[in-house]
Amino acid sequence: SIAPRSFFTSFPGGGHHWVSVIGPYDEHLVRDVGGLYLSLLAVSVWAVVRPRPEITRLTGVAWLVFSLPHLAFHAAHLGSFGLADQVGNMVALGGALVLAMVLLLPGARGPADTDVTYHRAAKSSGGPRPGKDTGEVG
């Protein structure tokens, strides 16, 4: 999105060229993909800064929806790459898919009782009263 030609000709760097071998340069497409990645970054940062189960799951779903077809496309088009770049592509793209799935695991959601409102009220009132459901305060 910021430097589309540079991304197209030199990603991932170190003398490797994973994008330009796939097809001709299209500034619009490269800028759109850059915007997509920046959007996923924004959602991911939000999930780290404000960790809530639904935000974590949404982030995982967003990355999964993007990563699965992205991995499938690249897996079907590895013929233009040498062995090291084939492995690098699959490790990087497969890693993104695995991380997306990890965000969907129950442990990634946090404890079932992560209602911040409840915890604040419980602390300020000395905790839930006997005979009340754990979600009730007072």
Image (cartoon, helix red, strand yellow):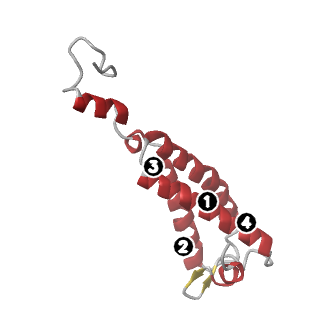
Where residue 55 appears, as percent x and y from the top left, is: 49, 44
Q: Assign a secondary structure to mark 1.
A: helix
Where residue 23 appears, as percent x and y from the top left, is: 78, 75
Query: How much space separates mark 3 and mark 2, taking CA atoms?
Result: 21 Å
Q: Is 60 on the left-hand or right-hand side of 77?
A: left
Earlier sequence position, callout 4 versus callout 2: 4
Q: Would you say residue 96 is visible in this rendering?
A: yes
> Could you classify mark 2 by the number of other residues whose Cα lies within 10 Å: few (under 14), some (14-19), or many (20 or more)?
some
Q: Amino acid at mark 4?
A: Asp
Q: Assign a secondary structure to mark 4.
A: helix
> Could you classify mark 3 by the number of other residues whose Cα lies within 10 Å: few (under 14), some (14-19), or many (20 or more)?
some
Query: How much space separates mark 4 and mark 3, taking CA atoms?
Result: 26 Å
Checking the image for residue 102, the label placed there is: 3
Q: Nearer the viewer, residue 51 or 14?
A: 51
> Which residue is disc 1 drawn over?
39
Q: Give the total of numbered labels.
A: 4
Is mark 2 in CB contact (under 8 Å) with mark 1?
no
**What residue occupies the far bottom of the structure in this picture?**
15
Q: Amino acid at mark 2?
A: Gly
Q: Assign a secondary structure to mark 2.
A: helix
| Residue drawn 29% across the image and 34% down it | 120
Question: In the figure, 14 relative to 123: above or below?
Answer: below
Checking the image for residue 88, the label placed there is: 2
Is mark 4 in CB contact (under 8 Å) with mark 3?
no
Q: Nearer the viewer, residue 101 or 109?
A: 109
Earlier sequence position, callout 3 versus callout 2: 2
| Residue drawn 34% across the image and 22% down it | 135
> Which residue is disc 4 drawn over?
32
Q: Quadrant of residue 87?
A: bottom right
Is mark 3 in CB contact (under 8 Å) with mark 1?
no
| Residue drawn 78% across the image and 75% down it | 27
Question: In the figure, 115 relative to 3: above or below?
Answer: above
